[in-house]
Image (cartoon, coloured by chain):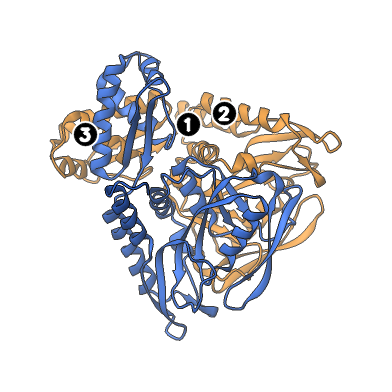
Chain colours: A blue, B orange
Amino acid sequence: MKKLKRSERLVELTQYLLSRPHSLIPLTTFAERYQSAKSSISEDLAIIKEVFLEEGVGDLQTMAGAAGGVKFLPKAQAADSLAFVESICRELTASDRILPGGYMYMSDILGDPKTVNEIGRIFATLFAEVEADAVMTVETKGIPLAYATAGYLNLPVIIVRRDHSAVEGSAVSINYVSGSAKRMHTMSLGRRALREESRVLIVDDFMRAGGTIQGMKDLLAEFRAQVAGVAVFVEAGDVEEHLVSDYVSLARIHDIDTKSKLASVTPGNYFAAVREMSAAIQGGETP
Amino acid sequence: MKKLKRSERLVELTQYLLSRPHSLIPLTTFAERYQSAKSSISEDLAIIKEVFLEEGVGDLQTMAGAAGGVKFLPKAQAADSLAFVESICRELTASDRILPGGYMYMSDILGDPKTVNEIGRIFATLFAEVEADAVMTVETKGIPLAYATAGYLNLPVIIVRRDHSAVEGSAVSINYVSGSAKRMHTMSLGRRALREESRVLIVDDFMRAGGTIQGMKDLLAEFRAQVAGVAVFVEAGDVEEHLVSDYVSLARIHDIDTKSKLASVTPGNYFAAVREMSAAIQGGETP
């Protein structure tokens, strides 16, 4: 690569870091790439760090020493995230979205890659420090959210199938009970898909009582893997008893009226979780 | 937003453009945002354009006039794309990936968001000018590729379901014949999901004879929508007759040996399509 001027280097560095979240990049990589002194690179990185923090893009962590370098951690600002979620809540509340069975039509919202990416960035903010090995979801609607989250965390995605016709070689299957109908279902995961004892983040689009999430947890236990966190986009709030307690939701549906096809939707428990985390960090505890 | 120095502005502009592909942004937006003269913004954009072209990130198109502005078009360089696809071909060829029925295990490769994003960027390069309204795929494995492509093209994603238990309200269903087994299946799409007469890009992970792709085309016809293009990640090359002729593939599988679980995989017809397109552009034709 030819030697770049500072202005060009700033553009290149910015795009390079943005496309490699949660990856430690040694300063020598940049010094060689741009034929520049490490001190100049450090100055560039200081400028980028400031702009990224100011604009709510994320943080640049610099590690000193021989194994050191710089790592870009995508992080959404809590106020921006809340404003984003509030606008989604308004959209979900406004129009006739309630389908038979009390389900909510969200395919338009989850069909927009910008929205999906922002949800992923918000999840990735909370889970930036949990050191997971993979993000797991069950087909179908959680898949885009899982990829968006995993992309920002630089992790692979594991998709659990609802049947096993789905050509993956040998698989582990479990039964689970889902929905208000309390019907029995099967989900399966290919043997090759997950290393034993991995730490896994579970992501899904919707949670009612939590049967599907509990199913994924049971499946993880079969692989002797750990749950590093659970995040759902929307939860139904009118549930008597949750099967799962330790999760975050971005939004919560109340007061579903199947007659008028309306419901009220408010921000979920994610924001309390973020406040707790920052309080813990400011208090000097590890989050 | 506070007034930024040029160095800060370059970082901010770069991240702003990268996160808004295929969106026309008026220069006044930047001038107000950064409290800078339009002439300074234009100089910044010229620097960014040069670096983006040089690095194979994409192109900045500037439109003059009152309705003008700047648009970032993500574009992968053909040589980079070929190198990327060749490395995937090697990965697919090397290990024991052939599953019963002649299917190929690709979940590890398609489980990596970086790989999926790059495939989406490569598809988006070819389809940068087709002016589609949406990207369509059928569940399950094509979904991440459809979102990646749609993200780079700033388009919504439409997911066709293989059953209709899937809570979407009223839907249109069609039957299609897929696979070497020539079995009859059903796919369905919610009435709300697609506006009539849309132009739609079809994206999928795998194509054998093309029955599933033909099914999506038939479904589009039901919505009086047009096919703007068809792109698949991998096609099986040992097929007597394709049901679909106008498509691009990134890779092609030959000589499947179910005994040794090996196959040979080579780059697909995408690269010929890109060469034709650039020849047409250089020849002054519209692509």
Check whether the beta carbons of the residues at disc 2 and disc 1 lie within 8 A of each other.
Answer: yes
In front of the other: label 1 or label 3?
3
Give the image location of residue B55, x and y in percent: 41, 25
Which amino acid type is shown beneath numbered disc 2? Answer: Phe
Q: Is residue A106 visible?
A: yes
Picture quadrant where residue A172 is located: bottom right
The numbered mark at residue B76 is 1
Contact (Cβ within 8 Å) of mark 2 with mark 3 = no
Q: Secondary structure at mark 1?
A: loop
The relative height of residue A129 versus residue B57 in the rendered view (above or below) is: below
Spot the residue most to the right: B259
Residue shown at 31% from the left, 57% from the top: A275
Sequence order check, earlier mark of 1 and 3:
3
Look at the numbered disc 2 and give the secondary structure of its residue. Answer: helix
On screen, residue B40 versus residue B46, left or right, reads left
Q: Quadrant location of the N terminus of chain B?
A: top left
What residue does disc 3 label?
B9
Q: CA distance from mark 2 to mark 1?
A: 10 Å
- At label 3, the amino acid type is Arg
Residue that appears at 48% across and 77% down: A239
Pick the front one: B213 or A232: A232
